[in-house]
Amino acid sequence: MKILVTGAAGFIGANFVYYELAKYPDDEIVGFDALTYAGNLETLDAALKCPRFRFVKADITDRAAVEALFEKEKFDIAVNFAAESHVDRSIEDPGVFLRTNILGAQTLMDAARKAGTPRYHQVSTDEVYGDLPIGRPDLLFTEATPIHTSSPYSASKASADLLVQAYIRTFGLPATISRCSNNYGPYQFPEKLIPLMIANCLADKPLPVYGEGLNVRDWLYVDDHCKAIDLVARTGKVGEVYNIGGHNEMKNIDIVKLILDYLGKPESLITYVTDRKGHDMRYAIDPAKITAELGWAPETMFADGIKLTIDWYLANKTWWERIVSGEYQRYYEKMYGGR
Ligand code: NAD
Ligand code: DAU
């Protein structure tokens, strides 16, 4: 099999590249990424040493480049991870989210149609369902939950999902969609909650908790997400949406305290800051469909996964310290300076 992985230099895309290379010793992977601020080629260092992996630097909205690549490579499966992925940035500047997340998906699907690619998979998010109230553990997102977006990021991801469904129905594109909850693990960009808190803790910097820290997210170790995407892209039913999540709801403040505790740092580092605009209260996924149809179940318990993750950041300081000291430093000052 030959597999296209867009967004391969980002957090989940890179983890997926390593998952596929290890699991399928005969498959070839083409990693595709524009290397935006969130893409880091260093993350793919080990993959680049493997003769079954190649990297293409290009933008998913570059129609000529995308169509030429699909025509030349004749992929068996195309998996689209490439996206602008950070909610806070989408509040600052929505335009690039619409361009990459919607028009990029359209460009990829047009190329897949032209080249007759047998399978296109769109990596989506639970954020397309909006949010759920706290104190109603009986309410979970199912695939039948209506789309109801809160941020420009989630609106752009939902728009792409609707476009995928339109391409399936109108053009018969053989596509699937997966909607996952919050991921954590190695190689996550330190603008996201868990790596940001680890990095700040290690530098004895304040830990900026939005609002009262009571918002709930449903955390999944990144390898479990990769395993689910692999199953859906290869064996999921064309035209279907699959929710992915591990029944692991946690309040932000509890995650922050857990990180402080593991690193032996004082809770006085916690600083409550102005809340995110439109901040979703709670996400919680019902993964019953993917479990029943494809036999997927998460393997890494949060208690283990968070230790693995913190240990990874401790052992790979140069990876994230280079990020934190570069362009990201200016972003951090802008986002948190007067908050
Ligand atoms: P990320 O920001 O770490 O990586 C995104 C990658 O896409 C980067 O390498 C970036 O360079 C690349 N990219 C951005 N714009 C591009 C463009 N125009 N052309 C080509 N490449 C481009 O994101 P992530 O956390 O790895 O998320 C990957 C996907 O998974 C996204 O589609 C996101 O919506 C989805 N998702 C993420 C999570 C999560 O918790 N991180 C959960 C569910 C779904
Ligand atoms: O649910 C899936 C989504 O999870 C993905 O689609 C997104 O790409 C991914 O970024 C993530 O979105 P969130 O907004 O949930 O993740 P983030 O890490 O930005 O924030 C997690 C929670 O922590 C959220 O309630 C906001 C809060 N937070 C975040 C940051 C960065 C803080 O309290 N302080 C912070 O500094």
Image: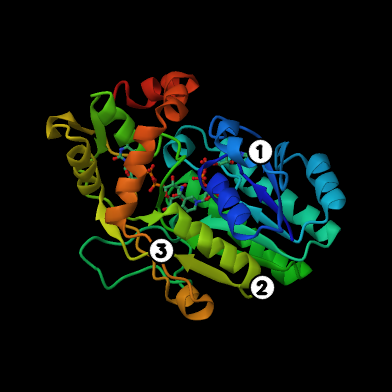
| Mark drawn on residue 48 | 1
Question: Which residue has dot 2 on it?
Answer: 238
Residue appearing at x 22%, y 36% in the figure? 263
Question: Which residue has dot 3 on it?
Answer: 245
Which quarter of the figure is the C terminus placed in? top left
Question: Alpha carbon of mark 3 to alpha carbon of mark 1: how far?
Answer: 30 Å
Residue appearing at x 56%, y 62% in the figure? 229
Which quarter of the figure is the N terminus placed in? bottom right
SS class, disc 1: helix
SS class, disc 3: loop
Give, as a three-letter code, the residue at label 2.
Val
State the image coordinates of residue 258 (x, y, percent, origin top left): 21, 45
| Among the two numbered marks 2 and 3 on one chain, the one whose residue lies closer to the N terminus | 2
State the image coordinates of residue 130 (x, y, percent, origin top left): 41, 58
* Residues at circles 1 and 2 in contact by the CB criterion of under 8 Å: no
Mark 2: few, some, or many residues within 10 Å (few <14, many ≥20)? Answer: some
Farthest-out residue, bottom? 292
Mark 3: few, some, or many residues within 10 Å (few <14, many ≥20)? Answer: many
State the image coordinates of residue 36 (x, y, percent, origin top left): 59, 31
Question: Alpha carbon of mark 1 to alpha carbon of mark 2: how far?
Answer: 31 Å
| Residue 186 picture quarter | top left
Question: Alpha carbon of mark 2 to alpha carbon of mark 3: how far?
Answer: 20 Å
Q: Is residue 222 visible?
A: yes
